[in-house]
Amino acid sequence: MKRISFLVRRLILPSLLSFPSLVDKKELPPISLPEPQIEGGRPLMQALKKRRSLRRFDPQSLPLPVLSNLLWAALGVNRVKQGKRTAPTARNRQEIDIYIVMTDGVYEYDAKNHCLRPVLGVDIRAIAGRSRFVSEAPISLVYVAEMGLFDQKNESDKILYSAADTGFVSQNVYLFCASEGLATCVYGDIDRDSLAKAMKLDPTQKIILGQSIGFLAAPELSG
């Protein structure tokens, strides 16, 4: 039954998103995140030892304070005067944006104001990635690069830097999840055209990777 339900979501949802009137959309309010708690958690070396990919998620939503800490660890502002982040970007372009796909809909993380800005009031987890675990995880982070911020004309250089910068953010998430006992798995098997259309991205915005996060449902082999 689970398999049938997954296939129905996979095949039908992309078609529904092409016809907005057929989808039960709702207005999403902005979400102010609580101040991130930067004390506690496992020491770095222990977090590195625990770092792994886990693909079985409990459907329980992440509490808002946990989501707040997660997003700050991923790409929050850790040097307020300079506006610099917890993950580096080439020449400090800060071209990576984080979109949060969850049951309520899609939000964009506003790091400067540490809040979530509403994007879409539809649950699109079924098309946020082709792997089944993506639709089962309570949230997935979709990493999007604003290619218009690059001054290089060489397209391969833009792809290289945006991919490397996304990797830094993803590893921050891995270490946070290892520190807090959460499950996470990064993925790249995405129908990027369909997802970009659903998320109403601009042509200069390119989806790089996704990363699912949640509480662990059961013991799982590492990856």
Image: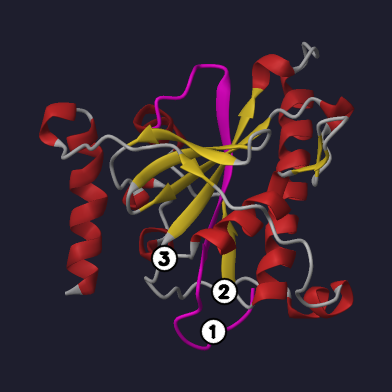
Q: How crowded is mark 3: few (under 14 residues within 10 Å), some or many (20 or more)?
A: some
Q: Nearer the viewer, mark 2 or mark 3?
A: 3
The answer to whether residue 214 is magenta is: yes
Amino acid bearing label 3: Ser
Residue 148 appears at what percent x and percent y? 66, 15
- Report the Cα–Cα distance between label 3 and label 1: 20 Å
Quadrant placement of the C terminus: bottom right
* Residue that numbered label 3 is attached to: 61
Residue drawn at (37%, 65%) of the image: 136
Residue drawn at (72%, 19%) of the image: 155
Residue furthest left in the image: 22
Residue 162 appears at what percent x and percent y? 72, 33
Q: Which mark is residue 54?
A: 2
Above or below, 48 relative to 185: below
Residue drawn at (83%, 80%) of the image: 46
The segment highlighted magenta reads 199-223
Element on which disc 1 rests: loop
**Callout 3–callout 1 Cβ contact below 8 Å:** no
Q: Nearer the viewer, mark 3 or mark 1?
A: 3
Q: Give the left or right position of residue 133, taking residue 27 as reference.
A: right
* Residue that numbered label 1 is attached to: 220
Q: Can residue 85 be seen in this view?
A: yes
Above or below, 113 relative to 147: below
**Callout 1–callout 2 Cβ contact below 8 Å:** yes
